[in-house]
Image (spheres, helix red, strand yellow):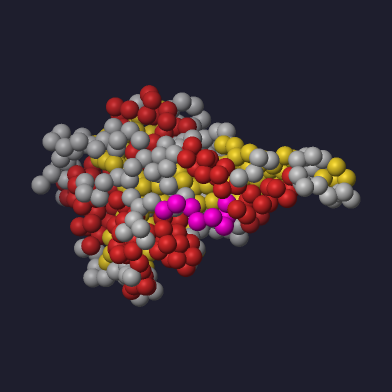
Amino acid sequence: MRSILIFALAASVYAETLEDRSLRYLIALLKLDTSNPPGNETRVARYIESEFAKEGIASEVIGGDPNRLNVIARLKGDGSKRPLLIMAHSDVVPAEPKLWTVPAFEALRRDGFIYGRGAVDTKALLAAEMAVLVELKQRGTKLNRDIIFLSEADEEAGSTEIQWLIRNAWSKIDAEFALNEAGARMLTDVGTDVFQIQTSEKVPTRVILVARGSAGHGSLPRKDNAVAHLSDAISKLVKAYMPVHLNTTTRRYFREMAKLDEYKWLGPYLPRMENSKTLFEAANELGDKDPELDAQLRTTVSPTMLRAGMKVNVIPNQAEAQIDVRRLPGETKEEVYARFKKLINDPLVDVLPEPGQDMPATEPSSLTTDLYKAMERVFNATGKKVAVIPYMSRGATDGAFLRAKGMAVYGVPVFKRDNKPGRAHGNDERIKESTLREGTALLRKVVEEIAAAR
Ligand SMILES: [Zn+2]
């Protein structure tokens, strides 16, 4: 009788399912405000440390700033293969309470959704990775490789911590490949389940244009008016068709996209895009139709900020524009600045790099690694109308720093987007509870497919 009672108690301790655990973690994580700046990610680090400790998983809380610590934990495998890294950042972008209709840090649950800053970017992934690690530990799953868990601080505003980790703790996170944020799963209008695996990313390359002319009274127009020269320069950049380059990821991306019903129209472009003589013209035509596809083909230019003048009747001697340039990883900054200078072709306008953050430019991660193939198998098995497509994200992640070290990094597309446009970085950020559950179960399958010993 007594032993039955003990057995029942023990069973109830482990009654929490993988999916319930992921939900519990996400709710706790969303309540920890890690708006960056200032971050305060140590809150999350300590929470993860204590949850892992309850499960007998040792973790290390380390970093370059006591308020902004990272967490590393490792499940040991039999060592026959090199480790798998599962990573997610612990900071979030700030939330503007006036623009939210719900609290941003209370993990409010309503109509099947959980609301909170970071619900999409990227505490859902963090919660799912924690839950999967605990699941493997509880079940005593035999692993053919170590699984390293990493929650890193400061992804959203500087990537200082991933750089600190690479410099100071490389042996603790070094792995054959990594699963990271920025994968995208979505349902097309005709019901194809599209899994976009992020294998590459564009490189933020901020540029400042500075036009200089002579100051004077607005009543006497001047040919060297700085405002006029600046606007000419901006307009030349925006109107120009930038050079087109395909890499292993984008080449496959276009081929796979053309198989989707909604993108059948891409079919005739493919042979023209394979031919270097017709690539540019074909790219310009299809880019004009679809800016998202255009951004896969070339370095893009978005003017975002202007500064000039104090008074309507005074001609300023200087005018400035900030340009958000997203560079193809195969191009150097110097090539981009040189091209802009040539396009603008105006001695009164300087093209200057914005000082500060410098992200590495890296080759796309391979489409033939065991991990990429494992994801293809797992995602293809989820249904009949499935497409698995590699893609280059327009946004940057900490993954770039690991790719620069030679690690293959993949944005894993486990969470279905519940709406378009997405709410990452937007107001009322939220995720469907069913999406979290389904995504966590899928992540577990991916991790087991690549790391469970057979
Ligand atoms: Zn993110």
Q: For the magenta stretch, what is the residue range?
A: 237-244
Image-quadrant location for residue 379:
bottom left
Question: Which residue appears at 42% of the width and 28% of the height?
Answer: 164
Q: Where is residue 238 in the image (x, y as percent from the top left)?
A: 57, 55
49 over 227 or under it: above or below: above
Which residue lies at the image location 57% right of the left edge and 57% below the top edge?
239
Q: Look at the image and say whether residue 240 sits in the magenta stretch.
A: yes
- The answer to which quarter of the image holds residue 173 is top left
Asked whether the viewer can see residue 14, the reply is no
Q: In this view, does 277 lie to the left or right of 210?
A: left
Residue 10 spot, x, y in % from top left: 23, 46
Q: Inspect this view and state whether residue 144 appears.
A: yes
**Residue 152 location, x and y as percent?**
41, 37
| Foreground of the two, 30 or 185 | 185
Give coordinates of residue 149: x percent, y percent.
Answer: 32, 38
Q: Does the magenta portion include 316?
A: no
Q: Is the magenta stretch mostly helix, strand or loop?
A: loop
Q: Residue furthest left?
A: 454
- Which one is in front, 63 or 5? 63
